[in-house]
Amino acid sequence: MARKILKITYGCFDENMGFEGKKFMEDLIKEGLKLRISPWLLFRGEHHFDAMPINSKSKPFLNGSFKLGTIRYKPEHIYLPLSDNLLIFESSEFNKGKIARDYMRLNYIAVCPLEELTDKEILKDGFENREDMLYQMTEMEGRYYQDLKPNSLVSYFAISGVGPFGHANMTTYEIIETLQKKGYWDELKKKDTTGWTKDVVKDLMARYKNVRLEL
């Protein structure tokens, strides 16, 4: 399949707004692929967060790039984001019901064989070069995706920035509103062991009198 790219804009996956997102999804289905929606992103290990451009303490990878990309894979499926901003969790903290670390603003989605990712995309996901990426993703013992091959179709989420979650601001409101509308917020509420889902909504309700969120 030829490489496909979708520029991510506000509402591009909303069925009422996103013509380009809808067309992108339809084209993938015509290729015989199944779509899998990512309502948030999980990252295993602190090294991912250390390299995210969050504040002045953030440090780039050894290759000089910040964490501004991530590869997602499932056989015969293509991952697509729920919206233009996604919550990000550390995997073990997510499983323990803890609050999201931050959120990521998406720039674009690329769908292509793993081996056709660009050099810039590879660097922004923390790899030293193409050979390093292919080794870690398809050959290294203990790798995350055991059945991934160089010609396997992957989704690449290109990230334009990282912002703080949990503050009573409009981005936090829009993220939660989308998760609630699509039915994913209930999953986070069930996993929540610290009360963070209720606290964040309460803070938003206290600041914005006309918010339409459920506790």
Image (spheres, helix red, strand yellow):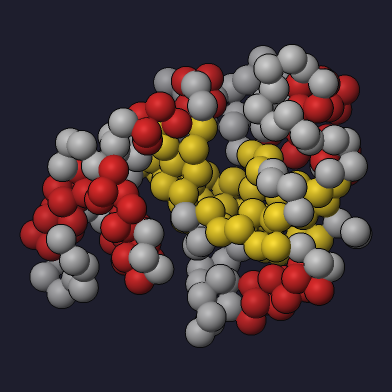
Asked if residue 155 can be seen in this view, the reply is yes
Quadrant holding the N terminus: bottom right
Q: Is residue 157 above or below residue 80?
A: above
On the image, the x and y values in percent for residue 122 come to: 76, 33
On the image, the x and y values in percent for residue 193 come to: 20, 37
Left or right for 118, reference 207: right
Residue positioned 66% across, 43% down in the render: 72
* The one of 47 and 151 positioned closer to us in this rendering: 151
Left or right for 215, reference 29: left
Q: Quadrant of residue 137?
A: top right
On the image, the x and y values in percent for residue 40 come to: 46, 49
Q: Is residue 197 above or below residue 136?
A: below
Asked if residue 166 can be seen in this view, the reply is no
Left or right for 69, reference 47: right
Q: Quadrant of residue 205?
A: bottom left
Quadrant holding the C terminus: bottom left
